[in-house]
Amino acid sequence: MTLKFLSAAGALTVLALASGASAQTAPAAAPAVSGGPALPGVCVYSGVRTIATSNAGKAVETRMNQLEQAVEADLKSQATALDTEAKALQAAQATQANDPAFQQRVFSFNQKKAQFERKFQIRNKELEVTKGKAIERIAKEAQPLVQQAYTERNCSLMIDRSAVLAGNAQMDVTDLVISKLNAKLPPFSFERENLEAQLQQQAAAAAPKPAAPAAAKK
């Protein structure tokens, strides 16, 4: 009988990678280079920088760090306990492998390990959904402000900052949008999404239904 275990270090490394993958990195403002004059009617805007550097966006990043740390602490304590139990079982395996009581301990351990791995996956998904909803809220609040900036700056063409290698900073309306967003949307609070009930409903819906009893022959 071979014991398999997802160690605490391995689980938390995956969590850290998954959390970091969802982080928004704000692009730097257009580099100051010597070039031509601003083109009338052409504007540049960075939605990513707006989300990352607005007051609400920075608060979201801070809050997400808090939620991630809380999840990590909870998972780490459980993973450490499982790791300790796994080592004890491995130490006893050579002399007790055929003992029914030992086999029951292994069975119980594997159940707890499976529950931990499921919880790990759910928490990771919850963090992903939580951050996505917070960012979506900021983006929706910013959209009409981008339109206002478009009108105020007499833009006839708006270009995404990510598509611009360099440009005259006078054409960039991002700071204007951020200023408007800071006045409109203060930092807001939120909690981690709870997907337990939703996933349980999905699992129940996907479970095979019992076959209908056959009709009695006449």
Image (cartoon, grey):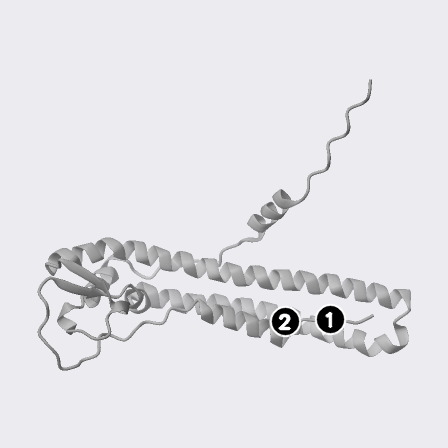
| Residue type at the position of mark 2 | Ser
**Which residue ends up furthest to the bottom in the rendered image?**
34
Task: Give above or below for 134 relative to 7.
Answer: above
The image quarter containing residue 103 is: bottom right
Which of the two discs, 1 and 2, sits closer to the camera? 1
Q: Nearer the viewer, residue 110 or 212?
A: 212
The C terminus - image quarter: top right
Element carrying mark 2:
helix
Q: Nearer the viewer, residue 185 or 115?
A: 115
Local crowd size for mark 1, using a 10 Å CA cut-off: few (<14), some (14–19), many (≥20): few
Element carrying mark 1:
loop
Q: CA distance from mark 1 to mark 2?
A: 19 Å
Residue visible at 66% across and 45% down in the picture: 207
Q: Is residue 191 visible?
A: no
Residue that carries the numbered disc 2 in the rendered image: 77
Q: Position of residue 109 (x, y in %)?
A: 76, 65
- Which is more N-terminal, label 2 or label 1? 1
Q: Position of residue 15 (x, y in %)?
A: 54, 70
Residue visible at 90% across and 64% down in the picture: 100
Q: Is residue 128 left or right of residue 198?
A: left
| Residue type at the position of mark 1 | Lys
Residue that carries the numbered disc 1 in the rendered image: 4
Q: Is residue 74 visible?
A: yes
Task: Give above or below for 170 relative to 206.
Answer: below
